[in-house]
Amino acid sequence: MTRRRARRASPAPRGAGADGPRRRRSPLVPAAIVAVVLALTASAWWLCTRPVVPLARFADQNVLLVTIDTLRADALGCYGGRAATPVLDRLAAGGVRFDFAHAHAVVTLPSHASILTGEYPFTHGIRENSGYRLAPGRATLATRLRATGRAAGAFVGAVVLDARYGLNAGFDHYDDRLPVGHVPTAISMPERRGDEVVAAARRWIEAQSGPWFAWVHLYDPHAPYAPPSPYDTQYAGAPYFGEVAWVDHVLAPLLDEVRAGTRPTLVVVTSDHGEALGEHGEMTHGLFAYEPTLRVPLILAQVGGATGTSHGTVSSVPARHVDLVPTILDLVGAPAPGDLPGRSLVPALAGQDSSDRVSYFEAMSASLNRGWAPLGGVLAGREKFIDLPLPELYDLATDAGEQRNLADTARVTDRMYSDVAALLSPDQREELETMRQQMQERVEKERKRRAELNAAAEAALKAERGNAEGKAPGPTPVPATAKQPESRN
């Protein structure tokens, strides 16, 4: 497949050898997850207790938020990845690199909505890339930082974050200009190169006289993978990692500029989601919520001004996208609303917050577009529960690849729903009961289908054996409803 944007030759790397009406859907309340949280929080959430605080509070510092689309945490060099990423490695070496950070959705628009609002998808209401729009008047990070006197500019690299979807709320300047004439496909959307996005952001930053907040979104690692020269040849057998190396390269002038600034800048680098690259039977992202697509990189660092030299640290404090808004507000000395689900990561880094912290996640695209079962889940400690008709439970501390499902269907579903109704509002209780009935119906349907498939397979095997013994087998009965499953849920 040809790339959707023209590629120009780039300098050698520094260190490298559809819009639609808003869906009116009842929000999928994660009430089923609440009981799982109650059961799983017995596990310790905080695995790292060494106090490390390489971040300081500066009321007048700039804020630079960089979101790199479709970036697996383990792709970066500082995470032990295959891509050469000296620019981001240097940033991590002077800041905090979180080794257990997670998104709440595995597609671009819902995940960015969580990053910018500090809310879970079931609260901000965006569950898929199309057909949804952030409700007018909803507060975003830009809204809150503008209230502190900062200018706010956004520079996005793909049409999925076009202003029409509502993420422009609070920004003085929202640059979503994209090349015209591109025809979207299932995995290709109109976008612009990372170097063009960075150049636009730099022009805006240079024009600011006071403190600012800039959001820079780079779409390049998204499929189809076609890194520019010389990354196309250096990563000929692994073009995804070539795209990651390219993005690292184009970030260099932006980070060099803020390092040279007289005012300190808080830099936050993360991804909206990862990329499966064939793991768990998924080539890209959006269907499932295994670690290759749910786990994201997260780097926080302060550069420029009088920040001085900081020795970087790696933190095992579990971090969530909903923690970013409270963390950023904390570091600029602004109060965070008490109704947000996230908490500042700064006290945890200092060893002052060891309370349990759980994370909700979902992958709703297949449910909304294909009629599959809704996929939601929760992370508590290093235990990860995936709520499906056939539930899955993994201990990520001993099974990072999610190969051993520890869930006993009856035990988990009973525990998941028992006594949860007492924690919910009347409307949520009704929705929970409806959800439970639907789940039970799906489980029974799946069991019946599997039994029919097993019967058909046994009949075919019996017929084959009879044929091998020289007997004339009768017709093999195949149930009319038997077919190969299209998905695991």
Image (tube, rainbow, N blue to C red):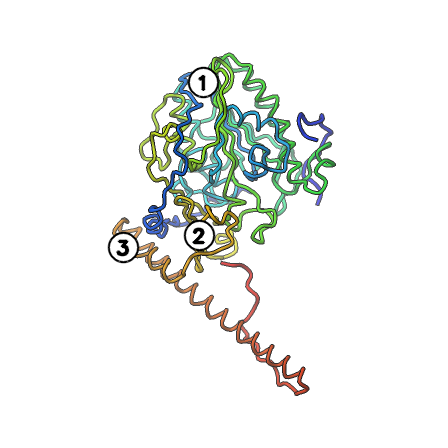
Distance between mark 3 and mark 1 Cα atoms? 47 Å
Above or below, 352 relative to 305: below
Mark 2 and mark 3 lie on one chain; the one further toward the N terminus is 2
Q: Which mark is residue 419?
A: 3
Amino acid on which disc 1 is placed: Gln
User: What number is the disc on residue 61?
Assistant: 1
Residue 64 appears at what percent x and percent y? 50, 24
Q: Are marks 3 and 1 in contact (CB under 8 Å)?
A: no
Q: Nearer the viewer, residue 124 or 114?
A: 114
Q: Earlier in the sequence, mark 3 or mark 1?
A: 1
Looking at the image, can residue 213 be seen? no
Dot placed on the residue nearer the N-terminal end, 2 or 1? 1
Picture coordinates of residue 251, whole percent (x, y): 60, 26
| SS for dot 1 | loop
| Quadrant into which the N terminus falls | top right
Mark 2 and mark 1 in contact? Answer it, CB < 8 Å. no
Mark 2 vs mark 1, CA separation in Å? 40 Å
**Along the viewing direction, whichever of 74 and 390 lies nearer the viewer:** 74
- Is residue 464 found left or right of 163 in the rendered image? right
Given contact means CB atoms under 8 Å apart, are the residues at marks 2 and 3 in contact? no
Q: For the point 37% across and 62% down, which residue is it? A: 410
Q: CA distance from mark 2 to mark 3?
A: 20 Å
To which quarter of the image does residue 468 belong? Answer: bottom right
Amino acid bearing label 3: Asp
Instruction: State the SS at label 3.
Output: loop
Which residue is identified by label 2?
Answer: 386
On the image, the x and y values in percent for residue 5 come to: 68, 36
Q: Which mark is residue 112?
A: none
Residue type beneath disc 2 = Ile
Residue 404 drawn at (x, y percent): 49, 55
The residue drawn where x is 38% and y is 27% is 350
